[in-house]
Amino acid sequence: MHKPKPLTIENRWDILYIEYPEVYDAFASVPKEPTMIDVMKKHFDLHNQTILDIGSGAGDSSFQLSSISKHVIGLEIEDNMRQLAEQKAKELSITNVSFKKGTALDISLPDYSVDASIAITLPLFIEDEIRTYIREAIRVTKVGGYIINLGIAPFCYGGDLASIILGDSKVTEEDTEGVVDRILRNEFGFSYFDYEAIQTYDSVEHIISTYGFIFGQQAIDYIKQTKRKHITWTYRVHYLIK
Ligand SMILES: C[S@@+](CC[C@H](N)C(=O)[O-])C[C@H]1O[C@@H](n2cnc3c(N)ncnc32)[C@H](O)[C@@H]1O
């Protein structure tokens, strides 16, 4: 028997990717201004490159990257997410993207096999796993190629509703995004820049059923009270040339 869908998964991203990939997809598909690809185009030349998209999810990042590159290989650990991405690629007739099952911690590609390795909001926050993923990303990238990690900036989990979502558990010293930032900059010599993007939902119901479903009851209550339909995200882009 199907268990009933809850109103929120209270930040349990592991449950989201396995049981509700379509909700993640609906959340990720809400337009942002600027788009991730606008930012990539402005800062990096990825034209005509073969790109590895690490943690490709339901395919949104791979599809955006495919619009400016030769080929994108999406690497994804969860079958449900990867299958959704494959189905969407067919529906959208995007032919320069392929999806592979696998983990960032042991990338099943040879050394120097892609022009750039990119991860867009890859959820790895354990110190040794971050190091392993970055070593793997560097290993498979050709000399002179980019390794790019785009994630939420420190203290910005959930965008500008961070303080509502985190409430009393607000972190003051180093949060999970801060761990990534410290390791990439101090141990691997990455440079970085931050940017803001505004995500606009078409209705209060839509933001509650996607963003609210993921980020929890506190966020849902706040959105209902304020009738807010947008979230401002601050992203940090770490980059390194091999
Ligand atoms: C926040 S989603 C981002 C999806 C996609 N990059 C996008 O921007 O649309 C993160 C994805 O990373 C995947 N993931 C988590 N750990 C991973 C790992 N070790 N290796 C590969 N993928 C992983 C999750 O299953 C999820 O689909």
Image (cartoon, helix red, strand yellow):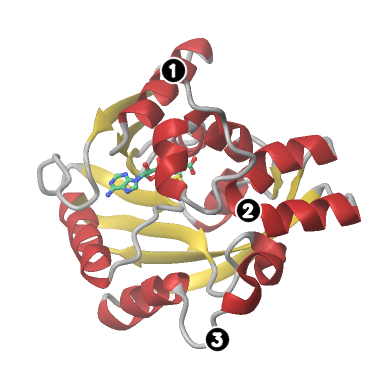
The label on residue 147 is: none
- Out of 161 and 109, give the one closest to the viewer: 161
**Residue 118 % position (x, y):** 37, 50
Amino acid type at image mark 2: Gly
Q: Which residue is mark 3?
A: 172
Which one is in front in this view, the residue at disc 3 or the one at disc 2?
A: 2
**Residue 34 % position (x, y):** 69, 50
Q: Which residue is mark 1?
A: 1
Sequence-first disc among 1 and 2: 1
Quarter of the rendered structure image containing ligand 1: top left
Q: Which residue is mark 2?
A: 216
**At 45% from the left edge and 12% from the top edge, which residue is drawn?**
90
- Out of 62 and 125, give the one closest to the viewer: 125
The span from disc 1 to disc 2 (Cα, nearest Å) is 25 Å
**Residue 12 % position (x, y):** 47, 50
Q: Can residue 126 be seen in this snapshot?
A: yes
Task: Point out the residue furthest to the front here.
Answer: 1
Q: Can residue 47 be seen in this snapshot?
A: no
Q: Secondary structure at mark 3?
A: loop
Amino acid type at image mark 3: Thr
Amino acid type at image mark 1: Met
